[in-house]
């Protein structure tokens, strides 16, 4: 870059930083009008102050979200590709790899509203109407199981919703409370005299398991080892005398080719539902063992009121019930949270049923 443009840049920066103090002296510009300030002053605060007039319901939000947001954030706010997930992650903040979403991590609904209104959709920020923003935020709340499907978000109902992590943030006051107590660490010759091992950590069973670590002094190591031998013998004898386990129920006969087809169809479901050994609940419950299982019984998943009512009525997911639900979830169960439109082809339903059977053995 030449010196001339750099000079212009420096001059521009200087002029901006001097305004408005120099504006009057140099005869430049004018004071912004209230209308001009209001156009930029879009901040919405946790107490709902500065919210615009308007409203939006969940199902309108689903339509607007599908049109303006789903290309990046997925049809169900589950995220597409490497774009952010907006739903799910409940109770994962203490995990090694937490899922931070609007429902699991964000502390204030005002942050969601302000961000959508100011910055979304990507590449066309500021094009959404206030009603559209209310509707999108309502749908995001619904996708996180925080409101029912008949919820309408507005300036009047805004404070009716409290995000789960509202109390999860604290003021960082370490500079006042901790920094003064820190001392310099000793890096060499810190302990006078010889250093000897006085305690050994013993892991019962597999020494590489990393579980149940117990510090034991060197003096009692031999005693502990001697005591372990008869205990192990007792376990072996008890195992030999234990009655034989009941024979496992016979596995369902499976059509391997149909299972493979069902796995492909299941790609339409993977955004919300997981299967397999490491499956966890997401926007929808895990589907391991769903074939033949009583409805609404997956631990840790928050079911909709209609699903819980069906469970109390004795609904069991057999072939007929699963087929009906997969064909048209909303028709099958009015008020279900599952917003998937359904599988229109009988062969796809048959294939996915066989796939679910393979994960229900």
Image (spheres, rainbow, N blue to C red):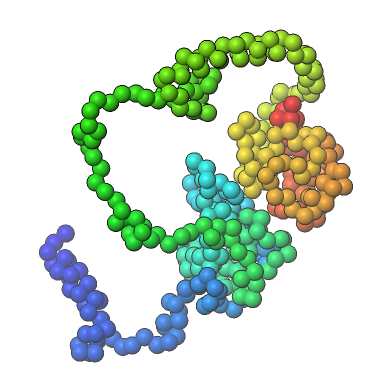
359, above or below 250, in the image: below
Q: How many marks?
A: 0
- The image quarter containing residue 60 is bottom right
Quarter of the image for the C terminus: give it.
Answer: top right
Using the image as rendered, state which of residue 347 and residue 96 is in the foreground: 96
The answer to whether residue 226 shows anywhere in this view is yes
**Outermost residue toward the right in this view:** 313
Q: Residue at x 54, y 19 (%)?
A: 205
**Residue 59, how many percent across, how many down?**
69, 62
In this rendering, would 99 be left or right of 143?
Answer: left
**Residue 154, how many percent across, how many down?**
63, 73
- The image quarter containing residue 193 is top left
In this rendering, would 30 be left or right of 130?
Answer: left
Q: Residue at x 80, y 21 (%)?
A: 249
**Residue 213, how many percent across, how many down?**
49, 28
222, above or below 186, in the image: above
4, above or below 239, in the image: below
Quarter of the image for the N terminus: give it.
Answer: bottom left
Q: Residue at x 20, y 69 (%)?
A: 9
159, above or below 33, in the image: above
The answer to whether residue 117 shows anywhere in this view is no
Using the image as rendered, state which of residue 109 and residue 355 is in the foreground: 109
**Residue 149, how many percent across, how many down?**
72, 61
**Outermost residue toward the left in this view:** 3
Q: Residue at x 25, y 81 (%)?
A: 19
């Amino acid at each position: 870059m030449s010196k001339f443009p750099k000079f212009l840049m420096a001059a521009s920066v200087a002029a901006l930083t001097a305004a408005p103090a120099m504006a009057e002296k140099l005869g430049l510009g004018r004071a912004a009008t209230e209308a001009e300030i209001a156009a930029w002053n879009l901040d919405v605060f946790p107490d709902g102050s500065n919210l615009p007039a308007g409203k939006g319901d969940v199902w309108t939000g689903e339509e607007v979200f599908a049109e303006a947001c789903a290309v990046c954030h997925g049809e169900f706010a589950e995220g597409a590709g490497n774009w952010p997930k907006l739903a799910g992650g409940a109770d994962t903040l203490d995990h090694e790899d937490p899922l931070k979403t609007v429902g699991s991590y964000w502390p204030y609904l005002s942050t969601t509203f302000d961000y959508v209104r100011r910055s979304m959709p990507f590449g066309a920020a500021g094009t959404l109407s206030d009603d559209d923003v209310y509707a999108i935020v309502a749908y995001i709340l619904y996708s996180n199981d925080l409101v029912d499907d008949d919820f309408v978000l507005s300036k009047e109902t805004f404070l009716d919703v409290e995000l789960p992590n509202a109390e999860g943030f604290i003021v960082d006051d370490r500079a006042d409370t901790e920094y003064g107590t820190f001392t310099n660490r000793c890096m060499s010759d810190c302990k006078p005299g010889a250093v000897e091992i006085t305690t050994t950590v013993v892991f019962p069973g597999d020494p590489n398991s990393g579980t149940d670590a117990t510090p034991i002094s060197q003096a009692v190591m031999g005693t502990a080892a001697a005591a372990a031998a008869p205990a192990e013998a007792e376990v072996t004898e008890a195992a030999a005398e234990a009655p034989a386990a009941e024979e496992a129920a016979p596995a369902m006969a499976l059509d391997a080719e149909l299972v493979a087809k069902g796995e492909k169809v299941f790609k339409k479901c993977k955004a919300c539902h997981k299967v397999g050994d490491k499956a966890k609940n997401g926007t929808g419950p895990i589907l391991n063992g769903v074939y033949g299982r009583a409805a609404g019984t997956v631990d840790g998943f928050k079911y909709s009121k209609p699903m819980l009512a069906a469970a109390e009525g004795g609904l069991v997911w057999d072939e007929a019930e699963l087929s009906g639900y997969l064909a048209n979830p909303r028709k099958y169960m009015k008020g279900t949270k599952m917003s998937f439109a359904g599988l229109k082809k009988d062969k796809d339903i048959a294939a996915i049923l066989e796939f679910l059977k393979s994960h229900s053995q």
